[in-house]
Amino acid sequence: MFAIGLITLFVAFLVVVYKYIIETAFISPLAKIPSASLLSSISPQWISRKRQAKQETRTIYALHQKHGSVVRLGPNEISVNSLDGFRTIYYGGFEKHPWYSEAFVNFGTRNIVTSLDRNSHSVQKRWIANLYSKSYLYDSPDLRMISNGLIHRKFLPIIDLAARTSHPIDIFDLTQALGMDFTSAYLFGSGNGATFLDDVDYRRHWFAQYAVFYNQSPQVRANGEIEQWCMSMCKAAELTMESEKAATGTQPVVYSKLFGCLQMTGANPEQVSRTAASEMLDHLLAGHETSAITLTYLIYEMSQRPSLQKQLREELFTLDPPVRYRLDISGKGEEALPTPRAVDSLPLLGAILQETLRLHPAVPAPQPRVTPKVPGGILIEGYANIPGGVRVSSNAYTMHRIESVFPQPEVWLPERWLQADPKELEQMRRCFFAFGAGGRMCLGSNFAIQGMKLAIAAVYTNYLTTIAEDSNMEQADSFAARPIGNKLVLHFQTI
């Protein structure tokens, strides 16, 4: 009996060795793909440690530089850095990896970002997608009122006071506040949204809370201060909807549409409330942080180039009216703004923003998908028979540094977007991944671009920026990549 037991153990050992070492390392269709390390073909621990050490994105970039367009990161995970492979993954109907639901669930409830399958995602997205379309945003009276109020009555007065008193400003702090006020006003109505530009103490308290929230699991952060804060704005928006007319400010454009659609599904009131709140919190968190990161790096680059500031200012003064801040005799600022279409049509402004999004993407990290289960597997970059269930991803940091598409990839060159021939420009646009790609790309990209362009126009129509303090401007190796130093302090000089 003892001998039989030993034989059984030995056979079991051989089965384990075959399945988890020999098969995965030498027989699997993934075995032909260059491995990140000697152990990565048989264990996910190598890439897991890189993620835990906040080294994932730059490590993957170095691996592609060494091994080419496809790299095996683990027994069941590959990274792809090529235009064809990228399009296979993000335009080929691959579902999202469960990682999203582990990271971005709010109120214990799924939202558009955490919906893993296309069907559930597309239903909720259809309800509100038109509210983020470029044509809708161009003509939205609510968004125009929000833009006028925030730019002329809050954002520019803060900068103007700093310029007149020679007081430096942390632009990362200020643009986070602008992003939150701008996004929340569109979601909930300007009378119900955040007031971070006005309330410096609370916004800094909130940012400290968010730093903790960001690193917590959905289970740990549930019903904490940030979720309660979001729910309070949801309830305020519901009161506005019940009154049919906002007492002051604008309508809760996004919340009212989503809430109404959820009610029509027949879900119970508690589920409607939590689903709507989960979606709104996702928009708030993504909207304020990614726009602030982009604006901070754009202004950082511009502040080192006074001649480019002059060129941009000349372009901005072709707007009718320009975003000019002047105090009248009552001490109030003028409130005229050009149309969003006019701002969006400026070529140099567009190139400056596009190049910042390329070199300093706010979300540079991998966006994982799962290969579909189809007979014979799938083909990626010449590697055939890749089975279903494999974690596969590309990332903006690496895609935006493909040298054949973006010469001098580490250099900030806005002119590349203006001087490229049509074929080159098409290639750059096809490789552009700052807002994701395919059917699951960022829902709010048009909203973010419109708001950022207006903010840039407001700054450089009126002021010259120079750097006062820029310690540690390297981007963090994380999903949302803010400056490691968490600030950029600037001097503003009135033109």
Image (cartoon, rainbow, N blue to C red):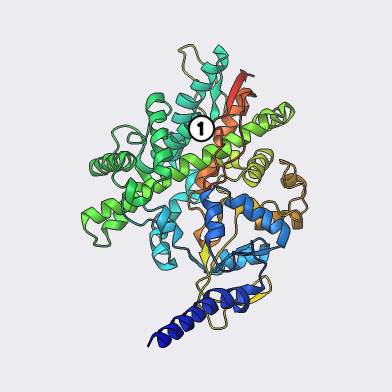
Horizontal and vertical percent position of residue 403: 75, 53
For residue 491, side relative to residue 205 (left or right): right
Q: What is the crowding at mark 1: few (fewer than 14 residues within 10 Å), some, or many (at least 20)?
A: many
Vertical relation: 320 (above or below) 237: above
Where the C terminus falls, by quadrant? top right
Location of mark 1 (residue): 175
Residue at the image position 41 percent from the left and 56 percent from the top: 102
Residue 386 seen from this side: no
Residue at the image position 61 percent from the left and 77 percent from the top: 29
Tally of numbered discs = 1
Residue at the image position 69 percent from the left and 73 percent from the top: 382
Check disc 1 and report its element: helix, strand or loop.
Answer: helix
**For residue 236, what is the image quadrant?**
top left
Q: Amino acid at mark 1?
A: Thr
Q: Which residue is outermost to the front?
A: 2
For residue 129, side relative to residue 411 (left or right): left
Where the N terminus falls, by quadrant? bottom left
Horizontal and vertical percent position of residue 217: 38, 50
Residue toward you, 384 or 347: 384
Horizontal and vertical percent position of residue 244: 26, 42
Vertical relation: 11 (above or below) 411: below
Residue toward you, 112 or 106: 106
Horizontal and vertical percent position of residue 487: 54, 30
Residue at the image position 47 percent from the left and 63 percent from the top: 97
Vertical relation: 61 (above or below) 340: below
Residue 53 seen from this side: yes
